[in-house]
Image (spheres, helix red, strand yellow):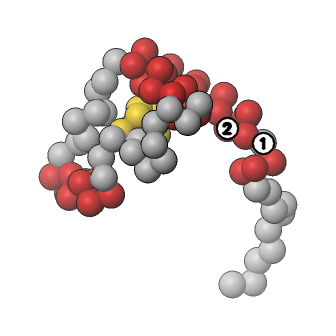
C-alpha cells in the first residue's frame, strides 16, 4: 500500500489507560456490557438494537468490573460502543 506506520503499539502496553477509557465511555452512556452471542449480534445488527443497549449505567459499570476481575466467563460478555 506504500505507507509506513508512525508507531507500532500493543494494547498490552497500556491496559490501565484502556480500562479507564472504557469506564469513562460507560459513565457517559456511550458504551454498555452486552451478553449476546456472536450469532445473535450478527442477526440483531440487521434487525434491531441489543436488548442490553439501554441497561442502567451503574449496572454496566458493575458488570464491566466483574469482567475485569474474571467473575464473568470469557466470551459471555462484551463491552460495546453505542
Q: Is residue 24 above or below residue 53?
A: above
Q: Residue at x 45, y 27 (%)?
A: 63
For residue 18, side relative to residue 60 (left or right)? right
Local crowd size for mark 2, using a 10 Å CA cut-off: few (<14), some (14–19), many (≥20): few
Q: Which residue is drawn at 33% across and 41% down?
A: 35
The quarter of the picture where the N terminus appears is bottom right
Q: Residue at x 24, y 54 (%)?
A: 40
Residue 26 visible in the current orientation: no
Residue under label 2:
18
For residue 7, side relative to residue 46 (left or right)? right
Residue 56's x, y, as percent?
A: 34, 18
Q: Residue furthest left?
A: 47
Q: Are marks 2 and 1 in contact (CB under 8 Å)?
A: yes
Q: Which residue is drawn at 75% across and 50% down?
A: 12
Q: How far apart are marks 2 and 1 (CA)?
A: 7 Å
The quarter of the picture where the C terminus appears is top left
Image quarter of residue 80: top left
Residue 59's x, y, as percent?
A: 39, 19
Q: What element carries label 2?
A: helix
Residue 48 visible in the current orientation: yes
Q: Residue furthest top?
A: 58
Depth check: give the residue in front, 1 or 20.
20
Give the label on residue 27, or none: none
Q: What element carries label 1?
A: loop
Depth check: give the residue in front, 54 or 33.
33
Q: Residue furthest bottom?
A: 1
Local crowd size for mark 1, using a 10 Å CA cut-off: few (<14), some (14–19), many (≥20): few
Q: In this view, does 65 lie above or below 51?
A: above
Residue under label 1:
14
Amino acid at each position: 500500500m506504500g505507507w509506513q506506520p508512525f508507531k507500532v503499539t500493543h494494547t498490552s502496553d497500556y491496559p490501565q489507560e484502556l480500562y479507564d477509557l472504557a469506564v469513562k465511555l460507560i459513565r457517559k452512556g456511550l458504551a454498555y456490557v452486552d451478553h449476546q452471542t456472536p450469532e445473535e449480534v450478527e442477526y440483531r445488527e440487521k434487525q434491531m438494537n441489543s436488548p442490553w443497549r439501554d441497561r442502567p449505567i451503574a449496572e454496566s459499570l458493575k458488570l464491566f468490573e466483574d469482567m475485569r476481575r474474571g467473575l464473568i466467563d470469557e466470551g459471555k460478555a462484551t463491552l460495546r460502543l453505542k
